[in-house]
Amino acid sequence: METTMTESREVSAAGIKMDETQGLTFPRIDCKNIDVFYGDKQAIFDISLPVPDRSVTALIGPSGCGKSTFLRCLNRMNDTIESCKVTGEIIMDGENINDPDIDPVLLRSRVGMVFQKPNPFPKSIYDNIAYGPRIHGLAASREDLDAIVEKSLRRAGLWDEVKDRLTSPGNSLSGGQQQRLCIARAIAVRPEVILMDEPCSALDPVATARIEELIDELRKRYCIVIVTHSMQQAARVSQRTAFFHLGELVEMGETDQIFTNPRERRTEDYITGRFG
Amino acid sequence: MTDIAPPPFRNEKALRRLKKRRAADARFRLYGLSAIAFALLALSTLVASIGLQAISAATYHKVEFDVVLDPAVIAPKGKDTPADISRNVDGFYALIRSNLQATFPDAAQDRLTTRQLGDLVTRLAVLPTAKWVSENPTQIGQTATIKVPLSDDLDLYLKGAVSKEFRLRLGDISAVTETAPQQLQLTGAGAFKALESLVDVQRQEVGDAVDARSILISAGATTGRVTRMDEDQAEVTLLTGSASDFSSVRPTARMIALPEPERNVSDLQIAWTLALKEKGRISRVPHTSLLTHTDSTYPELAGALAAIVGSLLTMMVTAFIAIPIGIFASVYLEEFAPRNRLTEIIEVNINNLAAVPSIVFGLLGAAVFLGFFGLPRSAPLVGGLVLALLTLPTIIIASRAALKSVPPSIRAAALGVGASKMQSVFHHVLPVAGPGIFTGAILGMARALGETAPLLLIGMVAFVADVPTGPTDESTALPVLVYSWSTNAERAWEPMTAAVIVILLMFLVTMNGIVVLLRRRFERRW
């Protein structure tokens, strides 16, 4: 089990190395000219944003600026909203995942998601983690499944807290634990990308700190895109930051550069608290 | 702008305003409480009135007969098959009648009296005995003790439901003289004083109408009717028994408020019944025939078994059709259907359908299922189909409400780990919505169980003497039985109808109990 998982990671790691030798910054996901419409209303205007692998990209901006909508384009969660229409190209592994030919179910098994409010299934802790691997047929046997559950919980830093009560319901955990359970659930299906939609907004500072540590840890293995309202959080956890405003991408770059030396006036106003 | 001072704790104005708000609170609580009290009162009145009526139908009076199962009477052909024996109602009834005539030899004087004696037991009441003997042929020729139900009017009399009756002990009788055949003069110093004063008190209440009332005097198994009396003497017509009993046993007097011509039981029949009771041959037993017999024109023989089975079969058909269709329709509408004009129209129509009077569904059933498809009349299959149509909107609406109440975050979570739409619905949404859906389904079924009108129109009101064995057999249903029994004239049907209502209510309470249990067991919180 362990070996297959590391193997698959090594393959993609090799892919990146190859690109690095050619001197290119290899984007894990490359978004080109994304427009999103809710009915007649356009929510996102022509956004192009490369997302690098093995790092955290933070999307910041005031409420209603389209950062969550953009995030949801990356695993096509917007498909579930009937009136929503997405145009443009989102390239992942050389394929446009926005192509109708691409099955969103397959896409979502590779691009996991963690939501704003912890939303464990009303099932046991074990079943919460095991559900994804089960439906994707990732475990050949009960032992495999146990191994996946344990590894996912360990990676989410929750194993020591719940190992003795895997059968108790997922909702019985505290808010911060629930959110880590959701992260473990997302990890369990072996995604390459993890999307996080304000994962700490419902948590207290202590739980937030734990999640942030976890994100920093996960960065070594996954490509992470996080939407956050907290600029401090973006500064703490991300390597790259993109600032959205009114559905447009105002500025993106290295997090240090955005927070210390923004190029755009609007970015500076926002991060210095003059609006938003 | 004026300065608004922070409200101090003892500000006069603020306190007045606060008082008003408190009063509004208290008023609202009062409205709520009185509404609940009213509802509880109505419910308890309903249950109590039905329960009190039904309780008298919980037991029944049966008469015991020691009869010789004479082959010459019950199997006259000599080579009767069991079927012949089980159908030989006349033969078995003859055994009963001759036993009665032997018990009361004085009744043989004329045809009318003999007929009255025979009416103590309904002819068809021997059917179970006949069936028992046909199944146990070795009993033929043996002496058997059989118990048959007393005629319904006499049963009611013994339960005190026929007429108001005043009963009192008389003084000792010192002399009994026979003045003419069956005419006795009873003498005892002050023996009838209490009876006299009862008559006087009653005369003040009802006037001369008191003279039309029967006064019966019984001693042991002997009963006579008073024709004239004063404090120390009474002239009595002997109805049954022997004159000597009056001097040996202290007698009891009964004044029956309803005059003889106005009731279905004669003084003579009452006298015989009292005698049988005195001899210990009448016993009050649980009225099991109510659950084990099918319908009959005689209340003492009638039971609700056919209707219970009919209702169960109907409910099975309804459940098999309405629940799956209802659940799938609501899951599709709620989870999969696109939101557009068409689904909106469907939604409005489903809501309208829930408000259509049930009798209209009956008309539809009669026209479509009976007329067009030619399905059998009076069958649980058709009843179930009609009730399924009736409950479908209820189930769909309840199920949709249950599905709507599932938090969308669960769907998002399932889709987020790569579940398909179908998997997210069946693995996560349905289990959470399950208790709500089943609550709706069972409540819909409970409503269907109580429906009468549509079943009347498809002919399930028929008199059904056989227990239906399948969904295409002729059948009736519990609420229809309530309806048809309540239209019967005889008094005895009244408590029986109440008893069937109680059976129906018990079904409903059971179903609602299942709902509560399901909720407790499976409701998930998040």
Image (spheres, rainbow, N blue to C red):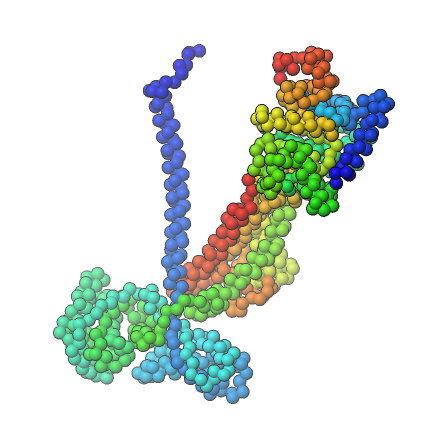
Q: Residue at x 60, y 40 (%)?
A: A164
- Residue B231 quadrant: bottom left
Residue A276, image x, y percentages: 62, 17
Q: B23 and B107: which one is in front?
A: B23
The outermost residue toward the right is A22
Q: Residue at x 50, y 48 (%)?
A: B516
Q: Decide: is B377 above or below B427.
A: below
Residue B363, image x, y percentages: 57, 55
The outermost residue toward the left is B189
Residue B357, image x, y percentages: 53, 50
Q: Decide: is B258 above or below B46.
A: below
Q: Is residue A262 left or right of residue A13?
A: left
Q: From where the camera sits, is residue B22 visible?
A: yes
Q: B408 and B449: which one is in front?
A: B408
Residue B59, image x, y percentages: 39, 66
Q: B121 and A1: which one is in front?
A: A1
Quadrant of image for the N terminus of chain B: top left
Q: Residue at x 41, y 14 (%)?
A: B4
